[in-house]
Amino acid sequence: MTDTAVNPRALLRDPGHCLSLGLGSGCIRKAPGTWGTLAGLLLYSLIVWMPWPVYVGVLVLTFVAGIYLCERTAKALGVHDHPAIVWDEFVGIWLALALQPTALVWLLFAFVTFRFFDIIKPWPIGWLDRRAPGGLGIMVDDVVAGAYALVLMALLQWGF
């Protein structure tokens, strides 16, 4: 984890920072992105029941809000895409789970495939991660990783 002058835990009292730090899950030092994804998977239970148009609206709203929230927290920490910023993992896993069965095996597969694409960063994920600025850059690579996981899972469900 990158050493900074500001400890991410010190920001948790601010609601916006608390959200971008994954309600504290990003403050776990070992594998914060994985812990953030796990927290997002648990919070998925709050949105899975929503009608499809509302679910899509939540994805769009959380993506747009994440651009602002993550950039604000990155500035406070003094590091672009600080490992503790995991709101992008929340949105990415929620996209990966869109239209998926809710059986445990599919939830676990979504978790693993999303983390795989987020860590490996195949094109254009890595390119976007390096080039997109500010909060958009923090958010967009995880959203594309979520889209890759969604497509892979859909293809497997359809027998490809």
Image: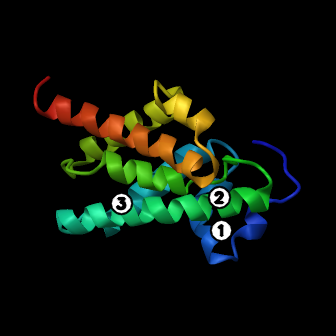
**Residue 151 position within the rendered picture, expressed as x and y whole percent measured from the top left:** 26, 35
Dot 3 and dot 1 residues touching (CB under 8 Å): no
Q: CA distance from mark 3 to mark 1?
A: 19 Å
The amino acid on which the numbered mark 1 sits, given as a three-letter code, is His
Which secondary structure, mark 2?
A: helix
- What residue is shown with label 1? 17
* Residue at image coords 51%, 26%: 120
Q: Earlier in the sequence, mark 3 or mark 1?
A: 1
| 93 sits left or right of 2 in the view | left
**Residue 28 or 1: which is nearer the viewer?**
1
- The residue lying toward the viewer, choosing from 17 and 144, is 144
Please give the label number shown on residue 71. 2
> Compared with residue 23, is residue 156 higher up or lower down, i.e. above or below?
above
Quarter of the image with the C terminus is: top left
Q: Amino acid at mark 3?
A: Leu
Residue that carries the numbered disc 3 in the rendered image: 59
Which one is closest to the eye, mark 3 or mark 1?
3
Q: Is residue 21 visible?
A: no
Dot 2: within a 10 Å radius of its alpha carbon, few (fewer than 14), some, or many (20 or more) residues?
Answer: many
Q: In the structure shown, which secondary structural element does the residue marked by tag 1 occupy? A: helix
